Amino acid sequence: MSKVGFFRSIHFKLTLIYVLLIIVAMQIIGVYFVKQLEQSLINSYDNSLNQRIYSLSYYLEQDSSKSKAELKEDAQKILNDFNNKDESNEISEVSYIDESREVIASVNNGNQEIAGKKITDQIISRIFAVGKDYEKKFYDPESNKRVRISATAVKNENQETVGVIYVVSSMESVFNQMRTINTILATGTLIALGTTALLGIFIFRTITHPISDMRKQAIELAKGNFSRKVRKYGHDEIGQLATTFNHLTRELEEAQLMTEGERKKLSSVIAYMTDGVIATNQNGAIILLNSPALELLNVSRETALEMPITSLLGLEDTHTFEDLVENQDSMLLEIEREDQLSVLRVNFSVIQKEHGKIDGLIAVIYDVTEQEKIDAERREFVANVSHELRTPLTTMRSYLEALAEGAIGDKELAPRFLSVTQNETERMIRLVNDLLQLSKFDSKDYQFNREWTNFIRFISLVIDRFEMTKEQHVEFIRNLPQREVYVEIDQDKITQVLDNIISNALKYSPEGGHITFTVDLDEEKGLVLFSVKDEGIGIPKKDMDKIFERFYRVDKARTRKLGGTGLGLAIAKEMVQAHGGDIWADSIEGKGTTVTFTLPYNEEQEDDWDEA
Ligand code: ATP
Ligand code: MG
């Protein structure tokens, strides 16, 4: 805000009004006073002169009975006397005129003759006729003076006009007095004006100072400085205004602090959210993003800010900003991050002002990669289970139909058909058992019956069993150390693992092949390694990790013929891991496969259990 110049300030205006009012008042007083004074001065001038002329007329009247010569002499004496008594030198001419209109005596101080003799004559004739005095005041430009002319009748006892006293007098003294008084008045006015103007400046400061103080405060407020307070100068309206102003400042400060606090809360919520948040302005340019959003979208803040949201989300080919505002649906995005494809769900919501104008868009981003993967796995699992169940069921139905249609009477076919259905049923039971077991692992609803076991002896027994029952011509080679290694295992469960690995090796071993069983110790990690090596078809590299997934089989058609469902290794993995070990496979395609698993071991059996 600009500074108010002195000549535009209230202070100046108030002082100016005040001074003008005083000038007007002084003028009115001055004019009235001067007029009255002038009148009164002129009156007293007239009165004193008339008084003197009256006494003059008295003396002259006394002499009227005398002879003309005597009269002339006496009148001249009286006039001289009258003139001499005029101390202020006002009288410039005095004459006495008798009935015959003759000037009997005259004193003339000024060297000018009486102006307008003729008029005088007329005046004098009128006085003799009517008996009324004459008086005139005028400005005489020749002598540059104000002049009074008077003609006064001199009357005898019978009230008859016997003569006229004609007086010309100067009124300069009156007007000189007036001039002096005017000067005094003017100086007085000037002094009074100066003093009151100065006083006014100081007095009005008490009014304007709080106002300009509040003005400064308002400017500071606009800048966001709430620390300033207006001083309270009194209890009048301005004082109350100052109090209200200070109150307003406090309220504003509180409101400001509250909004600031809310803003901070909001920004820390946004910053520490695990979901990504993006906000745009009304044009769709990004104005805010939190770090999870940067991480999820794999961009830097510098590049993302100001960027249109559609191009940041890679939607510029399919969507406009208006589409996003209108639809406000959530959508799935695929973003490549660190060589991995992640799936993001984005929810949009529009920021609207009260009157419905769109102010921007907020996008919340979640990483749903994991969930999408789980969903996909679940869908696949259900599909797999239904498929695995449908195959044996359809086989059984066709065999049972054939039996119902008459094959039951055939002594040769009937037992064969029945045995097929029996096999399929067993296969289904096995499958359902496997699934049950896996679901128990998933829900952590299992219990191990662990006991300390001599691992080498335990394995030897399992291998012996396979050696006895195997139908193929496959040679078993045992690389087992001659020492005691103890593991704490649930024997049933580990037997199941061994069964699956060894039966897999047998399944894929060619006639006359070898299967090598090896036990190794990793003393550093305290692990015992058991591996089964065959010389079968091997596993392609790309499938190496997947064979431990549920229902995964490298060659579905062939393995199904061999009776596999693809659950064996998945179960084995769960079990080994539940024992604190791990399982993996190495293979060279066409040459053979080695499946290895580890278990934590102890050199000695725990003493208490030794004899038990
Ligand atoms: P199940 O064990 O449930 O009867 P399966 O043997 O087919 O069925 P897994 O034991 O889980 O299932 O094995 C998964 C897949 O891994 C097999 O289908 C097979 O393709 C491959 N596989 C496993 N062991 C070997 C091996 N020793 N040689 C070659 N391929 C193997
Ligand atoms: Mg198997």
Image: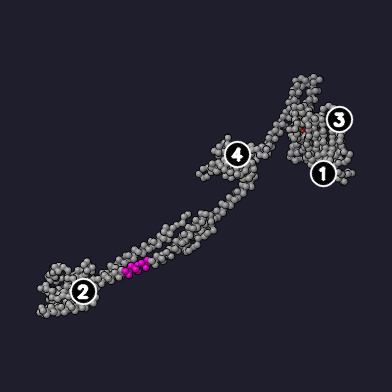
Q: Residue at x 36, y 67 (%)?
A: 190
Q: Residue at x 78, y 40 (%)?
A: 578
Classify residue 171 as left or right of residue 60: right
Q: Which residue is mark 2?
A: 91
Classify residue 325 as left or right of residue 104: right
Q: Which residue is mark 4?
A: 313
Q: Which residue is mark 3?
A: 475
Pointer 1 residue Cβ closer than 8 Å to ligand 1: no
Query: Looking at the image, is 349 positioned above or below residue 174?
Result: above
Element at label 2: strand
Q: Is residue 371 visible?
A: no
Quadrant of res 6: bottom left
Element at label 1: loop
Which of disc 1 and disc 4 is earlier in sequence? 4
Q: Residues within 10 Å of mark 4 (few under 14, many from 20)?
A: few
Q: Residues within 10 Å of mark 1 (few under 14, many from 20)?
A: few
The region drawn magenta spans 183-193
Q: Residue at x 82, y 34 (%)?
A: 532
Q: Nearer the viewer, mark 4 or mark 2?
A: 2
Q: Residue at x 49, y 56 (%)?
A: 218
Which of disc 2 and disc 3 is earlier in sequence? 2
Name the foreground residue: 100 vs 25. 100
Q: Amino acid at mark 4?
A: Leu
Q: CA distance from mark 4 to mark 1?
A: 50 Å
Which of disc 2 and disc 4 is earlier in sequence? 2
Name the foreground residue: 250 vs 400. 250
Q: CA distance from mark 4 to mark 2?
A: 118 Å
Q: CA distance from mark 1 to mark 3?
A: 33 Å
Q: Which residue is mark 1?
A: 524
Element at label 4: loop
Q: Are marks 2 and 1 in contact (CB under 8 Å)?
A: no
Q: Are marks 4 and 1 in contact (CB under 8 Å)?
A: no
